[in-house]
Amino acid sequence: MMPWLDPANMVPMFPIRFMARDGLQLNGYLTLPAGFELGQEFAEPLPLVVNPHGGPWARDMWGFNVETQLLANRGYAVLQVNFRGSTGYGRAFWEASFGQWGRAMQNDIDDGVDWLVSQGIVDPARVGIYGVSYGGYATLAGVAFTPDRYAAAVGYVGISNLFTFLESMPPYWKPMLEMLYEMIGNPQTEEGKRTLHDASPLFFVDRIVTPLFVAQGANDPRVKQAESDQIVDALRARGVDVKYMLKENEGHGFHNEENQFEFYEAMDAFLAEHLGGVARK
């Protein structure tokens, strides 16, 4: 697929396993910069980028990952957690995510960070988070619900308000709406309204102190531009300087090469500024 890349220049992805705070076994992957191995003694803990996957009912897989290799090349450890709800671990593991956006699903990501810190691998003062789609939601939830954990955050087409997200479903998702109400929260019941409110980062912007970079496609049919606009506007109204990259010719993720280059160059510099990695031109 990419014959210009020399496999010898790539770093390995290590499978990891740890326990969530409620005793659920979790799996994931850790990628380390060149020269580091899982199991070695770390004289100096590494900066970390947590990279929660999209979906959320999907999963991270072992294998070559362009973004993971990019981040490791810049000096970051990269954590990918298959939090509860990730597919491939059975029905009970999937159903354990129902109603748990911003709750147990988010705790699973946090527990992965804490496990790496306890192993002496990661510097808790230099932890960043970067995610796309649901991963973008997890990024916003992370900085809203655990404001002291992250030193930098990049939310890419991330959901900020679960009410407006469910209201703006694209037509091809309408047949699944009742199922999504059960899985995320039902805005037609009082309990569901509380669940959606308490899991929506937009309603907790007053807690956000982490430097934030938001990226959004104006034509995104799944995560509408309003999801990014709302939280950027709310933060800017507080005087918070949020970096916002909005592309008028993009949808759910950037597909035009010039936009991809611009995004990754901007993220590279942003993470280097706040986490101390090495930005490259």
Image: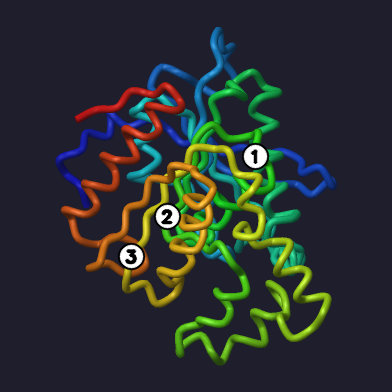
Secondary structure beneath disc 1?
Answer: loop
User: Disc 2 versus disc 3: distance between alpha carbons?
Assistant: 9 Å
Q: Position of residue 99 (x, y in %)?
A: 74, 68
Q: Amino acid at mark 3?
A: Gly
Camera-side residue: 128 or 97?
A: 128
Q: Amino acid at mark 1?
A: Pro
In the foreground, 94 or 144: 144
Q: What is the quadrant of residue 268 in the picture?
A: top left
Above or below 3: residue 1: below
Residue placed under numbered mark 2 in the picture: 156
Question: What residue lies at 51% left-to-right and 82% top-to-bottom?
Answer: 169
Question: Residue sitting at 51 percent across and 35 percent down?
Answer: 128
In the rendered image, the vertical position of residue 193 relative to residue 175, given as above or below? above
**Quarter assignment of residue 177:** bottom right
User: Residue 217 bears which disc, if any?
Assistant: 3
Please report contact status of discs 3 and 1: CB closer than 8 Å, yes or no: no
Looking at the image, is mark 2 or mark 1 nearer the viewer?
1
